[in-house]
Image (cartoon, rainbow, N blue to C red):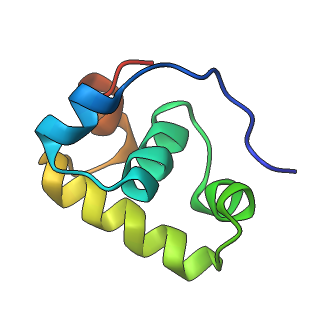
Amino acid sequence: MPFVGIWIDVSSSMNMAGLSRKEWFVALVAAHGGSANEAASSLGVQPRAAEQLLEAARLKLNARSSSEIRRVIPT
């Protein structure tokens, strides 16, 4: 089942962090407790691609885990 969340305007925060839209989406899913597989299903990409997007987002956000992403991304 795809991850379903709340739509919020995060474009300015996303741009400040230097994240692509897909990186931001995967990070937002992780911040809400979702998995890379759930994000992959919602984006229509392979799970490995979502994991790579999440890793790229973690690096750009200077976060080591999904729990650290939660403190950076508004949930």
Along the horizontal axis of the image, is 47 left or right of 62?
right
The residue sitting at 55% across, 41% down in the picture is 29
Residue closer to the observer: 24 or 29: 24
Q: How many marks?
A: 0
Depicted 19 relative to depicted 11: above or below: below
Quadrant of residue 23 in the image?
Answer: bottom left
Depicted 68 relative to depicted 12: above or below: below
Along the horizontal axis of the image, is 65 left or right of 61?
right
Residue closer to the observer: 54 or 42: 42
- Residue 54, given in percent of the width and then of the height, sits at 39, 60
Quadrant of residue 6 in the image?
Answer: top right
The residue sitting at 51% across, 78% down in the picture is 49
Depicted 74 relative to depicted 56: above or below: above
Quadrant, the C terminus: top left
Depicted 36 relative to depicted 28: above or below: below
Task: Find the residue positioned furthest to the right.
Answer: 1
Quadrant of residue 37 in the image?
Answer: bottom right
Along the horizontal axis of the image, is 57 left or right of 38?
left
The residue sitting at 40% across, 67% down in the picture is 53
- Residue 58, given in percent of the width and then of the height, sits at 25, 54
- Residue 45, given in percent of the width and then of the height, sits at 64, 74
- Residue 16, given in percent of the width and then of the height, sits at 12, 36
The residue sitting at 12% across, 48% down in the picture is 62
